[in-house]
Image (cartoon, helix red, strand yellow):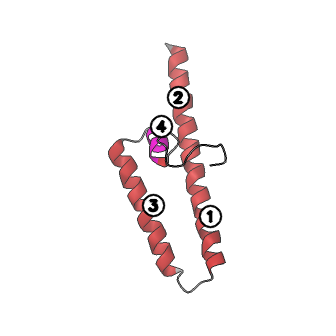
Amino acid sequence: ILSGKSPFKADHNHIHHRLLAAGFSHRTSTLILMIVTIFFTIIGFLCKNMSIIAVLIIDVVIASILMEILILKVRKVRRLKEEANTNN
């Protein structure tokens, strides 16, 4: 939205495509997304008596950690591909 693009327009910036870019298969990407969804659902149920701000902070921290792991994985895959290309 900030870049002037519709969030509903198809592109390769969605999390599924980022998982594929990290080297995961379609099946594994789907499984990861399902597990993360179930995880956040369980967190929601466990935190139902907490304030919404506390739950939001917990969710943001966990999501940030997961995104950092994904970013590091994508960078590693890209670096390995670049090294393989330079060695050929």
The residue mark sitting in front, 2 or 1, is 1
Whether label 2 touches label 1, CB < 8 Å: no
Whether label 1 touches label 4, CB < 8 Å: no
Counting residues from the start of the chain, the first of labels 4 and 3 encountered is 4
Q: Is residue 38 left or right of residue 63?
A: left
Crowd class of label 1 (few under 14; some 14 to 19; many from 20; radius 10 Å) = few
Tell me how far mark 2 sits from mark 4, CA to CA: 12 Å
Q: What secondary structure is marked by label 4?
A: helix
Q: What secondary structure is marked by label 3?
A: helix
Counting residues from the start of the chain, the first of labels 2 and 4 encountered is 4
Residue picked out by circle 1:
60
Residue picked out by circle 3:
36
The kind of residue tagged 1 is: Val
Residue picked out by circle 4:
21
Crowd class of label 4 (few under 14; some 14 to 19; many from 20; radius 10 Å) = some
Counting residues from the start of the chain, the first of labels 3 and 1 encountered is 3
Tell me how far mark 1 sits from mark 4, CA to CA: 23 Å
The kind of residue tagged 3 is: Val
> Is residue 86 placed above or below 54 in the rendered structure?
above
Q: Is residue 29 left or right of residue 46?
A: left
Counting residues from the start of the chain, the first of labels 2 and 1 encountered is 1
Whether label 2 touches label 3, CB < 8 Å: no
Tell me how far mark 4 sits from mark 3, CA to CA: 18 Å
Tell me how far mark 2 sits from mark 3, CA to CA: 27 Å
Crowd class of label 2 (few under 14; some 14 to 19; many from 20; radius 10 Å) = few
The percent position of residue 79, horizontal first and vertical second, equals 57, 29
Residue picked out by circle 2:
80
Whether label 2 touches label 4, CB < 8 Å: no
Q: Is residue 20 rendered magenta in the image?
A: yes
Tell me how far mark 3 sits from mark 1, CA to CA: 13 Å
Q: Which residues are magenta?
A: 16-21
